Amino acid sequence: MANNIFQKLVSSVGSAMSKFIAIAKFEKITDNADPDAPIKRINNMKRIAVMIGLLILVLIIVILLLRGCQGGEPPHGSVDIPGNVIDPIPPVVTPKADLEFNNTNAEENLSFDVEGMNGGDSKSILYRVKATYNSDFVLKYDMTIREDEEFQKLAEILKIKVELVKTDGDALLYDGLLTDMSAVEIDLNADKDTTTEYLFRITMYLDAPLSEQYYGQKLIADMSWWIEEQDNISIANNEFTTISKTIPPDPPAIIPNLSFITKNEGDNTAFDMRHIMNSDSQTRYFSFEVTHGEDVKMAITNAIVTDSKLKEVLKVKVELVGENGNTTLYEGLLKDLNVEHTLTKNDNNKTAVYYKVTVIADGLTEDYCETKLVCDLSWTLDGTSEQLKVPSNSFVAYDKPVTPPDPPTPPDPPTPPEVATSIELTAKDGYDNVPFSVDNMLPGDNATQYYCVSVTHDSTETVRFYINVDTAQNLTAVMRVKVEQLIPDAEDKILYDGLMKDCTAVDVNVTASSETVTPIYYRITVYTNGAEVGNEYAGESLTADFSWQLQ
């Protein structure tokens, strides 16, 4: 209402001013026509000035009243509440967070699968986790070991390092035993939709030499990233195993084999008896080499090819020739020959066998004149297809039986040849006899090679192993070697365990036996003791010669 009054007063003052200006212009124009015009104009202007002054006074009063209404008591019939501010009501936002892996790199976000862990071994994998959130949250990470009892032993020593990879420097979130780790946390802060990618480096490692109680141990664990009451992602079945106790490879399978060998002229030839008289005889020697990895039976049989009644009077004696005398295996009719004996397994997996076979005519009469018998003699390894045959053994009776002369004296059995003593490295499956070539050894590392030394001898011998190494090389102060003899069907024997430079005389005795070749199996391990090796040995190298010698 006051505003309306004010506007009307302003309008009146404006109108009066307009009239004053208009009158002044008109009277100026008419001054020349009326001689009294100046006096009239002065009077009119005075009246108008009085009127304008009154209007201005009224205007000032109204302005004062309006100021009083705004700063003092409101006029009767009106209410004024100043300082009212009304803001728009913001929308309600629901806190939410999502997690997912960024799988653009095939070498990231993988499960651990680590076999044959040893002291000092480690493996790292990167995990790229993308978090989308619109409020304040906490991102958590943890790795949980399966509760199976078989996994708890390795848990005693397996360690984990969790790092957050950043451009301004990596942040270490945890480093220690896996069993001691609680969930690591990262704060997420936002008041609007926000997406952040985090790159985690997870390293699993063993930082100490592995003792025997931890050989062959296994552990399975599951790892997860999550936000409470929101989203979670995980990678299950992370598997870790330690090395097993070093076991020498099984000797190669021995395939049974039977072959002729010739010790003396005339060995392994068929019988050829002609004009047989009563008590006539003939002797042949048969020599074989038998390859066998276990006890095996040798069978000796006869198969008649051309039959006659001469078979009733021909007898045979089969003897096994040995160093301490002959052993009779069979003595009876030739037609009934079917005998076997056992060859015992030995370290050389080979047996030389010598047989003396004698055929005798016993009870020959005129009824047998001009009769003929042909047969085949066979030697067979029982349970195998290995067989050697001496065919076409021929026996023909004389046309008129007479008293035969005394039989000739059979020759002495063949004398085994003298054995020349020697030594050589023999490569077999698993025993390759190759030199060591080890790079980038770390404290506590080790490397192993297998060697087979064959000794040819006919008496007790001593084989000495020794290492030639230049002690001027720095690593001789810390490089160690362990020499073991692997004995089939017996416990391994430690021959030496100490500094390589001190390994100068490691002896093994081999005794004389029926076999002329004796193999000796070695396992040699070079290693460093982690407590002895410091940075002063970094980049050092060592060269050594391994030697075997007959004493």
Image: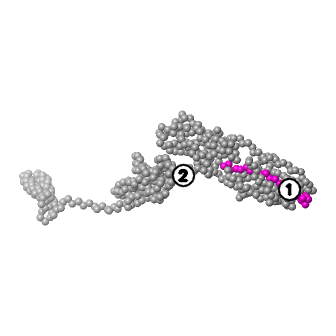
**The residue under label 2 is which amino acid type?**
Ser
- Of the numbered discs 1 and 2, the one sitting upstream in the chain is 2
Compared across the picture, whether 225 is left or right of 56 comes to right
Q: Amino acid at mark 1?
A: Ala
Residue 428 seen in the figure: yes
Q: In this view of the protein, which residue sits in the foreground, 31 or 192? A: 192
The spot of residue 272 in percent (x, y) is 85, 53
Observer-side mark, 1 or 2, equals 1
Q: Residue at x 58, y 42 (%)?
A: 436
Decide: is 58 above or below 467: below
Residue 94 horizontal side relative to residue 297, left or right: left
Q: Is residue 384 left or right of residue 85?
A: right
Q: Which residue is mark 2?
A: 244
Give the percent coordinates (x, y) of residue 194: 38, 56
Within 10 angstroms of label 1, few (less than 14), some, or many (20 or more) residues? Answer: many
Query: Which residues are the magenta region?
Result: 347-370
The outermost residue toward the right is 400
Q: Position of residue 150 (x, y in %)?
A: 49, 57
CA separation, marks 1 and 2? 67 Å
Q: Is residue 401 magenta?
A: no
- Please tell me whether mark 1 sits on a helix, a strand or a loop: strand
For the residue labelled by badge 2, is the local secondary structure a helix, a strand or a loop?
loop
Q: Residue at x 10, y 57 (%)?
A: 61
Reading the image, the residue beneath label 1 is 361
Q: Residues within 10 Å of mark 2 (few under 14, many from 20)?
A: some
Q: Is residue 260 at all visible to an observer of this figure?
A: no
Q: Position of residue 323 (x, y in %)?
A: 74, 47
Residue drawn at x 64%, y 38% is: 551
Magenta span contains residue 361: yes
Q: Residue at x 36, y 54 (%)?
A: 187
Image quadrant holding the N terminus, namely bottom left
